[in-house]
């Protein structure tokens, strides 16, 4: 076999294998979409794989007329925006002073922050703290504990260190205060990293589930992930019940569960093009400096 | 510079950093202070200060508990198997993507392969259920359609383990390629041309040029992963696990949640959490030490 044929075989199989990987990536989503658009009868009889059978929008009609679901979506959007704005403000407030190498006590402050990356009190003491602060069942229980991520803070600091000092010094000679310089010079130059980290925070909050399970028991304050978990959990429980031969469990229609999954996924997919670009950049910054 | 002058010049910076530092002290050091409930007979009504000291009594109770060792074993087992299965996947995928000639196909593949990284574990849990479920899951529908027996992917522990691992690969393999692809941009393309002139085939090229170019990244990532062998997220095992496979799916984090928040045994749960935090710290510091020795680069 000649060199050229060998290379051609390699290239072709490579393309085929990657195409298979891409298909495996997409297939589960196609199945869920198909289920969400199929009739209950088709789902029950197990006919639905990757394409809808007996097309119906009934499941989506039910999701979109479910007040609790819409309220949960609204609350999650509010929560995500609030979290992102506050997290970013606090991250900048910490990163700007800590990027100034001449600041006295900087090393100590960095140490105080970095320790928290390697040791934490754990789930129970955190829960007790939130409880003692009377934050259970408030939006703040989901916002405050994650206000500044040390990882993202370090990314921000290393970005700020890369801004030429001469620019800021020039502003200071003109009589600008540090805060004035931050707003007029530093922040406008930091937009790429701010966009990246905002997306990190926003996605983390949107997808976050553990803290909602711990801190929220009031249905009005269920974020989407918690709401969705309960819908899905219903099906897991029912699967077990069926296995054990007890049929008392109220089973939600599979189509409704699938439609709920899609309902919670679509917002992420809508912003995905931005996510992807900025996340890749962010990982690069983190990888180079970290 | 005199102190007054220094403060006069820098007070705004201290003012800015003050609030984040308060945040760290309250929400990160606060729980560390709360760790003392591991040494107290804690109950919610008496609070941290009102509860009585019991020393290491609760530790003895935890270390005599069979379930604790089961969850410890499961944590190590799931992480170790994850390392074996999920660690090579992005490496192989990155090399394959790097070998692609067509620009648009590579871009398209990357875009699609990254998607699962952005999907929450709750959603992935929902998808897993609908794809692997025994009664109505897609795969079992296909199997029964072909006249084969259905496979209890989620309710038999061995099968569940495979499902758990496969889900991890699905979620992380694409995204994991980023660091490798970044490292590969550093490889001098002329090396490939030289290799071609020398008549080196594709596999030879990968073996002698691509893989050596990734060595540092591979070693660093491997050490980081080993450092986290006792640390396990809560959401993935909690959402994908279920009662039927608790023998394997119950890990330290879900155990802490169950014992502490569902049964209200706060002291015991805190002990388990503290054990995990301390051992985890030792592992991470050890990993960093090894990384410094091997690659001259600190991962911290």
Image: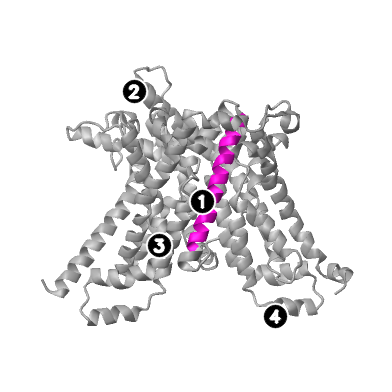
Residue under label 3: B218
Vertical relation: B99 (above or below) B261: below
Residue under label 2: A243
Residue plotted at (78% across, 76% down)? A172
Instruction: Determine whether the residue tagged by mark 4 lies in a helix, strand or loop.
Output: helix
Task: Tell which tag, 2 or 3, sits nearer the viewer.
Answer: 3
Q: CA distance from mark 2 to mark 3?
A: 44 Å
Where residue A220 sits, quadrant-wise, is top right
Q: CA distance from mark 4 to mark 1?
A: 43 Å
Residue under label 1: B283
Q: Is residue A257 left or right of residue A180?
A: left
Please check whether the numbered discs 3 and 1 fall on a single chain.
Answer: yes
> What chain does mark 2 sit on?
A
- Quick one: label 2, few (<14), some, or many (20+) residues within 10 Å? some
Judging depth in this view, the residue of B242 and B150 nearest the camera is B242
The magenta segment: B266-291
Q: Is residue A222 visible?
A: no
> What chain does mark 1 sit on?
B
Q: Which mark is residue B272?
A: none
Q: CA distance from mark 3 to mark 1?
A: 18 Å
Q: Quadrant of the C terminus of chain B?
A: bottom right
Instruction: Determine whether the residue tagged by mark 3 lies in a helix, strand or loop.
Output: helix
């Amino acid at each position: 076999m000649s060199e050229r044929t060998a290379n051609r075989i390699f290239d072709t199989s490579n393309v085929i294998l990657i195409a298979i990987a891409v298909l495996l990536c997409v297939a589960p989503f196609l199945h869920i979409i198909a289920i969400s658009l199929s009739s209950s009868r088709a789902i029950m009889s197990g006919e639905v794989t990757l394409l809808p059978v007996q097309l119906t929008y009934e499941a989506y009609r039910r999701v979109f007329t479910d007040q609790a679901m819409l309220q949960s979506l609204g609350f999650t959007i509010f929560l995500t925006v609030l979290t992102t704005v506050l997290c970013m403000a606090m991250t900048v407030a910490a990163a700007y002073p800590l990027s100034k190498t001449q600041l006295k006590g900087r090393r100590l402050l960095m140490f105080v922050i970095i320790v928290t990356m390697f040791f934490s009190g754990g789930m129970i003491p955190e829960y007790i703290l939130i409880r003692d602060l009377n934050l259970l069942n408030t939006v703040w229980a989901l916002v405050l504990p994650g206000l500044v991520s040390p990882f993202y803070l370090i990314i921000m600091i290393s970005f700020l260190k890369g801004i030429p000092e001469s620019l800021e010094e020039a502003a200071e000679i003109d009589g600008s205060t540090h805060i004035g310089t931050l707003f007029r010079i530093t922040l406008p130059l930091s937009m790429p990293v701010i966009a990246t980290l905002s997306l990190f925070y926003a996605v983390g909050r949107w997808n976050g589930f553990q803290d909602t399970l711990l801190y929220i028991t009031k249905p009005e304050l269920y974020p989407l992930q918690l709401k969705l978990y309960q819908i899905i959990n219903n099906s897991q429980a029912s699967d077990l019940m069926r296995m054990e031969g007890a049929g008392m469990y109220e089973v939600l229609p599979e189509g409704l569960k699938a439609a709920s999954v899609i309902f919670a996924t679509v917002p992420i997919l809508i912003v995905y093009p931005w996510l992807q670009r900025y996340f890749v950049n962010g990982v690069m910054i983190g990888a180079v400096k970290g | 510079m005199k102190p007054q002058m220094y403060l006069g010049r820098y007070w705004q910076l201290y003012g800015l950093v003050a609030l984040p530092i308060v945040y760290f002290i309250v929400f990160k050091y606060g729980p560390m202070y709360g760790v003392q409930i591991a040494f107290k007979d804690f109950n919610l009504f008496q609070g941290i200060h009102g509860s009585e000291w019991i020393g290491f009594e609760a530790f003895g109770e935890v270390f005599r508990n069979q379930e604790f060792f089961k969850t410890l074993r499961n944590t190590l087992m799931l992480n170790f198997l994850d390392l074996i299965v999920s660690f090579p996947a992005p490496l192989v995928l990155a090399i394959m993507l790097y070998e692609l000639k067509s620009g648009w196909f590579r871009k398209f593949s990357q875009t699609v392969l990254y998607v699962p990284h952005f999907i929450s574990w709750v959603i992935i849990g929902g998808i897993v259920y609908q794809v692997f479920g025994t009664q109505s899951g897609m795969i079992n529908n296909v199997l029964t359609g072909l006249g084969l027996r259905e496979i209890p992917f989620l309710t038999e522990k061995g099968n569940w383990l495979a499902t758990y691992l496969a889900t991890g690969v699905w979620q992380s393999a694409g995204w994991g390629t980023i660091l490798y692809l970044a490292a590969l941009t550093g490889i001098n393309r002329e090396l490939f041309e030289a290799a071609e002139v020398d008549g080196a085939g594709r596999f030879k090229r990968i073996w002698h040029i691509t893989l050596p170019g990734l060595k540092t990244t591979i070693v660093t990532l491997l050490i980081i992963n080993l450092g986290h062998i006792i640390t396990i997220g809560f959401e993935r095992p909690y959402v994908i696990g279920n009662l039927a496979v608790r023998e394997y799916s119950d890990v330290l984090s879900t155990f802490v949640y169950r014992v502490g928040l569902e049964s209200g045994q706060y002291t015991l749960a805190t002990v388990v959490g503290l054990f995990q935090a301390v051992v985890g710290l030792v592992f991470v510091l050890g990993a960093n030490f090894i990384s410094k020795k091997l690659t001259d680069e600190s991962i911290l």
